[in-house]
Image (spheres, grey):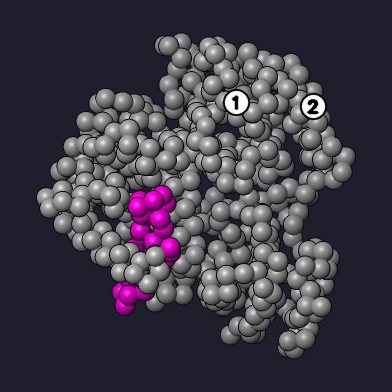
Amino acid sequence: MQLCIFDLRRGQQEGQELDKILFFFPADLPFATQLSVIGLSEGLITFTRIFSPDAACEVIEAERHSHVFYEAESDIWMVMVVDKSKESKAACQVDALRKVLKEVHSLFVLFHGTMRSMLEKETSGGLIRSHLYPFITDYLSGKPLFYCSIPKAADFLTGRKLQLPSFHDCLMERGTVQMLTVGREAAIEVQSLVKVLECSAGTTSCYSLVLFQDLLVSTTLSPDDTISLFTYAVLRLTPHALSSGATSWSYLQRTNAGSQVPALSTITNSGSVSDNIYRSQNNCQVKRPLHHNRWFRGNDGFLASDIWGTDNGSQTSVTPIVYLQLTEERMYLCAYQHKSLTIILLVPVSSILNGEQGLSLVKQQVLENASLKMLMVEEKLSKGWGGENAYHVSGYRYLLVDDERVSRASPPAKVMTLAKESLLALSKLREEVNLEKKRAKCSNKLEICVRAKNGAWVIARTSRGKELYMVLEKASETLLYAADSVEKFSNRYCSGVFSLD
């Protein structure tokens, strides 16, 4: 696998071609090879724009490779080149690979702002490269490429080999949030808590995110910002992330200082790009928000990290600053945790006059005004929590995605019981649905039902922007029985949205 990021506005003069490279993995490839990959990608983008000016290519299937494209920002492209094999031809969904690229970009923008703004701030490109290389390296070495069905799965990188999304992940959806279903009484308590948090912050322009376990309970953010923060919280902030962090590993050499780029010789090579990385690193501190095992819970319940250093040499950790996507407004990220409850409060930097000192007063107000409510909310949610198999439906293995980018699926342990033939058939079916959605460009009703080689029924239905994918391995021989099973599921759990009436 090769992953590159390049800027079409740079390096257009002869002899300056290296300037367009912002990131390349693996970085130890010769620059001639890197330029060859980027040159081919640039040519494909230019060619396809002749026929589709508003939407250039998303994927090019060659005999030996698949080229997956994502225009992260205007003229800034992310491209993944995947070698084909007998296994990968059936395993990788193009849409899943594009969502990997999109997630990398959204997380980077969350902590560093847009790539274009960084290039405008420092035109040589050294600043953005010095941030992209450690950030994406931490991303690749820090989690499964997909929410794998095996608990505590291996990282992206096994030695030098990258584990791509496979057919095992076809009942999961990247780029969505997973919501916790709560009763009316608990919902009222959560709503009351959110209001108290806003009042405690002393500003009407603060935002909050409430999570229980690894599930979203409440958000006051836009959908894009919600997904970015939810993804980061599940990666690094929730109780599960903090407890499992010790099992994370990387083939990259680790350092004690969070601001240092790990083993630069491993992720860069000699030449213009690496020179810029070293120069920029000497002039500014590189923050690594995806670095492993750097978050901990303080005595007051607030989470802290040494990634961003300490305040004026004191023992107080600097609170991280994140960027909202639509407005690019800078916000302090304050995270509080009590048992299974995690609360993220975003406070505008412009509203805090004295930096960390002023922010500590806000945290104190939150503890004084909201501590009791946070205890009550955690208690109510825990009582109503059905455990890891809370959303299991006997006889069904399913994935439900709605138009608000919320997904719900069978528990991973239940998905693991499916036969390989069933998952392969569903993976191919999802590719067909994705192609059909792009052709139709609307939310028309769609139903596809396929009999897998092992006799299982694999079903996809779309309606009003919502999608339902299902595997029925113990269904009857008849299509009518399978269709009736889907109807029952739709009426009971989806308010009849997927019914054919």
Crowdedness near tag 1: few (<14), some (14–19) or many (≥20) residues, C-alpha within 10 Å? many
**Helix or strand or loop: what does disc 1 sit on?**
strand
For the C terminus, give its image quadrant. Answer: bottom right
Q: Nearer the viewer, residue 77 or 336?
A: 77
Image vertical order of residue 190 relative to residue 199, above or below:
below
Magenta span includes 77: yes
- Inspect the image, locate mark 1, and give the three-letter code of the amino acid beneath it: Val
Magenta span includes 457: no
Where does the image place residue 467, in percent across and percent down from the top left? 66, 66
Say whether disc 2 or disc 1 marks the residue closer to the N-terminus: 1
- Spatial distance from mark 2 to mark 1, Cα to Cα? 20 Å
For the N terminus, give its image quadrant. Answer: bottom left
Q: Is residue 212 visible?
A: no
Judged left or right of residue 189, residue 36 is: left
Q: Nearer the viewer, residue 20 or 108?
A: 20
Residue at x 23%, y 37% (from the top left corner): 124
Residue at x 51%, y 29% (from the top left corner): 330
Image vertical order of residue 475 relative to residue 104, above or below:
below
Residue 425 sits in which quadrant? bottom right
Residue at x 49%, y 19% (from the top left corner): 317
Judged left or right of residue 337, residue 15 is: left
Numbered mark located on residue 347 in the image = 1
Residue underneath mark 2? 373
Q: Nearer the viewer, residue 246 or 268?
A: 268
CB atoms at circles 2 and 1 under 8 Å apart? no
- Extreme-left residue of the structure: 15
Segment tinted magenta in the rendering:
54-83
Residue at x 54%, y 13% (from the top left corner): 353
Magenta-colored segment: predominant secondary structure? strand
